[in-house]
Amino acid sequence: MLAITYAAALYGIDGFLVTVECTAERNLPEFEIVGLPDAAVRESEKRIYTGAANCGFPIPEMAAAVNLAPADRKKEGTALELAILCALYKTCGIIPGSCDMENKCFIGEISFSGDVRSVRGVLGMTLAAIAAGKTEIFVPLANIKEASVAETEGVRIYGVPDIPTLIAHLNGEALMEPSCDDPFMDVASPLFGDDFSQVKGQYAAKRAMETAAAGGHNILLIGPPGSGKSMLAKRMATILPSMTREEALESTKIHSCAGMLSDETPYITTRVFRSPHHSLSIAALVGGGKMPSPGEISLAHNGVLFLDEFPEFQKNAMEALRQPIEDRQVTITRAAGRVTYPASFILVCAMNPCPCGYYGSKNEQHPCTCKTKQIHDYLSKISGPMLDRIDIQIEMPALNFAELSTVQPAEPSAEIRERVTAARDLARRRFREAGYKNADTLSNGMMQTDALRTFCALDETCTKIMEDVFSRLNLSARAYDRILRVARTLADLEFCKGGIPEENIIGGQIRKHHLLEAVQMRALDKKYFI
């Protein structure tokens, strides 16, 4: 007898539908799986048969063969076990022939006790099943909140605790209730323990961070120990705009694929802040492994990637960031296949100006003790091409006593976030007006050459300034473009202070003071990295 059920498997962060074809006949007990299964799938036989027996629905002795289609795609993980079990039950009559499997998809791992265990990547697989036209999705009960993110009209998603519950439902004896909660319906504004109001002084650095957040620009903070570099960086996520549903879905898919969701955090609704240690490997940073998995840059997608003690990162790991920063994605190729992970993040780097940390400091109690060669070797760990990809470079001097002792709170994150959100909205409206298809996901920091020439056109005065800056600072073409992007963001922030008139969607013209401030935010590479 032939039985067909449907499951889903992962490839990268996206799922794809798997057709499970099972044939069985009365004969000596035998079980075989074909269709490029990995070791975990091949081991599923023991879990399926033992779990079925221990929950009171043993599989009769028979010769069974299972084919996983498409047969030319690698299947990995344990998410196929529930569908294989249902196909076996269908062939032996435990699930009646009248039960229609055509519109159903089964995702889950079987335990020895007959419980259905959680698996990683449920959201991506659920979305793939819905895209394939399946209207009833069965997932482990532990993954129901994550899977419910994908719920749409006409689709029912069920959380399956164990095999008997599923059998009773399919046989019509005791129907399960589908999930009906949309996790995004009641998402309140994010609450952060960290806030910009806690940061004393450093007004230039705060202005630079606000600009970076408003335009999606990368930023480098340079200063002595204790100047507040890490403190500022950790608060970057608190001034970013709230996530859209599409951004939340994409971030949740990545974390689900990496197995980083939990009962406390079944989906991602706030901007992610990732701060890996400088000892991490290239694979941990950009992704990799025998079967490629997402790295830190993908886990930081739609959020912030903070690299503290930037020069201490491995040279190869640091240089591996260059392509993802430009392309906003990373492609990992291995013998087992090639996957592409999204990697659109704001890069925040922090570093000391020298090994001891006090080069250039005016603090007489902490003079720099480094030799010239030590300073040169330390700063030269950061290559010119890497610096070119960092839009804003800001110096943070040590705080004085008056700044530290003030009791007046600084501007809170909520007020800064309002300006940042308004500037981002203005940029998106500009891109939509110009006809960009992906306007809702673009920011000023992502503008390509054609958009730069359109939205960052300079008048005669600004052109002369940029000509002088280009020759004096010996800028590269990439650095020139990044100054224009930052100037565009500064103009947007100023334009948003008085609201956004409906008749002016493009926004205000880049003026001289915008350009000079953008250059000032870019000039440190010639002070330290000459």
Image: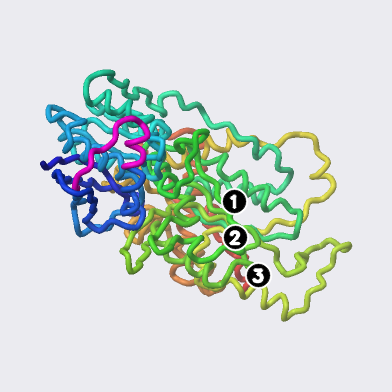
Q: Position of residue 63 (x, y in %)?
A: 19, 48
Residue 56 among magenta residues: yes
Which amino acid is tagged 1?
A: Ala
Tell me the magenta residue range. Answer: 49-64
- Which dot marks residue 393? 2
User: Which residue sits furthest right?
Assistant: 365
- Quarter where residue 93 is shown: top left
> Which residue bears the numbered disc 3?
527
User: Residue at position x 32%, y 65% from top?
Assistant: 336
* Mark 3 / mark 2, whichever is N-terminal: 2
- Quarter where residue 53 is shown: top left
Q: Indicate whether 222 appears above or below 427.
A: below
Instruction: Measure the C-alpha gap from mark 3 to mark 1.
Output: 18 Å
Q: Position of residue 164 (x, y in %)?
A: 32, 27
> Which residue bears the numbered disc 1?
208
Is 282 on the left or on the right of 433, as rendered? right
Which amino acid is tagged 2?
A: Gln
Provide the secondary structure element on which disc 1 rests.
Answer: helix
Provide the secondary structure element on which disc 3 rests.
Answer: helix
User: Which residue sits furthest front?
Assistant: 28
Which amino acid is tagged 3?
A: Lys
Is 290 on the left or on the right of 227, as rendered? left
* Mark 3 / mark 1, whichever is N-terminal: 1
User: Which residue sits furthest top?
Assistant: 174
For label 3, count other residues whose C-alpha is less than 10 Å away and answer few (under 14), some (14-19) or many (20+): few
